[in-house]
Image (cartoon, grey):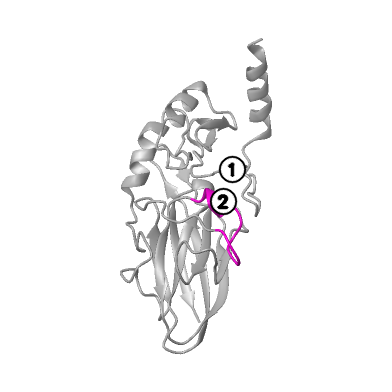
Amino acid sequence: MRRLPLCLALAMSACGSSTIRVSDAGTPNDAGTRDAGASGGGTAQGGGTAQGGGTAGGMSAGGAAGGTSGGAAAGGSSGGGAAGGAAADAGAITLNGSDTCSTSAPDVTAGGTFLGSTFLATDDYSVSGMGCPSGGAASGRDVAYLLAPSVTRAYRVRVTPLERPLGDGGVIRFDPMLYVQPVCGAGVCVAGTIFNGVGEPEEVTFTVNAGQTVYVVVDGELASRGDFELDVSF
């Protein structure tokens, strides 16, 4: 009876590693907060489920490594997971946006490019409502930025996830959500997107009226967390 898992593992290793795109509805196909990459010849996703030829050592060491709130794990390849979660949260990129929406959030009204990370943030907002991206109820850690133009202005905001290398040769890949709200946590969004998969950018365009304040929130789909580049233009 114990030969069946081994056979399945061998069949999966023959197919190689692949990324399953997450649907707009937020189906938990790949929480994707860590792709353990080449180390140990396998990957671990969504809390340490070994794929692509991972060994039993990878599952035991990686699966226990660095879980986020909401159930996603930093996961890991053989022997590398235990250090991976702590190293990731220590972070090469510090928290850039505000952990919550408030007047202390960085003002990006004038536009620009900003490096940020959600590793040191907390999960404050799970969006739902008119104009908000679906699947938001399962979101991860989030950071916020403020827009408050003195004239009516059309904005384009793009978040590009960045890979974070780990000491075991693996990487962490981020699956961001992006949304804009007049009041964070409210049941309405000015704009929002969750369309693309792990490692792919998200982009929204929207108009902010003169004297209006809105908050751009970089969140993580299905509890994903990671580093990113935020581009704000008009």
Percent position of residue 223, x then y: 49, 47
**Mark drawn on residue 198:** 2
**What residue did someone put label 1 on?**
30
Give SS at disc 2: loop
Main SS class of the magenta portion in the image: loop
Q: Is residue 181 left or right of residue 6?
A: left
Residue 7, located in which quarter of the rendered image?
A: top right
150, above or below 55, in the image:
below
Q: Residue at x 46, y 34 (%)?
A: 76
Label 1 CA crowd tier, 10 Å (few <14, some 14–19, many 20+): many
**Number of marks in picture:** 2
Q: Position of residue 220 (x, y in %)?
A: 49, 53
Q: Is residue 175 left or right of residue 19?
A: left
Q: Amino acid at mark 1?
A: Asp
Residue 164 has which mark? none
State the image coordinates of residue 211 (x, y, percent, origin top left). 42, 85
Residue 135 within the segment the image draws in magenta: yes
194 and 197: which one is in front? 194
Label 1: which secondary element: loop
Residue 5 drawn in magenta: no
In front: 162, or 207? 207
* 2 and 1 marks in contact (CB < 8 Å): yes
Q: Which residues are magenta?
A: 128-139
> Please, what is the three-letter code of the amino acid marked with disc 2?
Val
- Quarter of the image for residue 100 reads bottom left
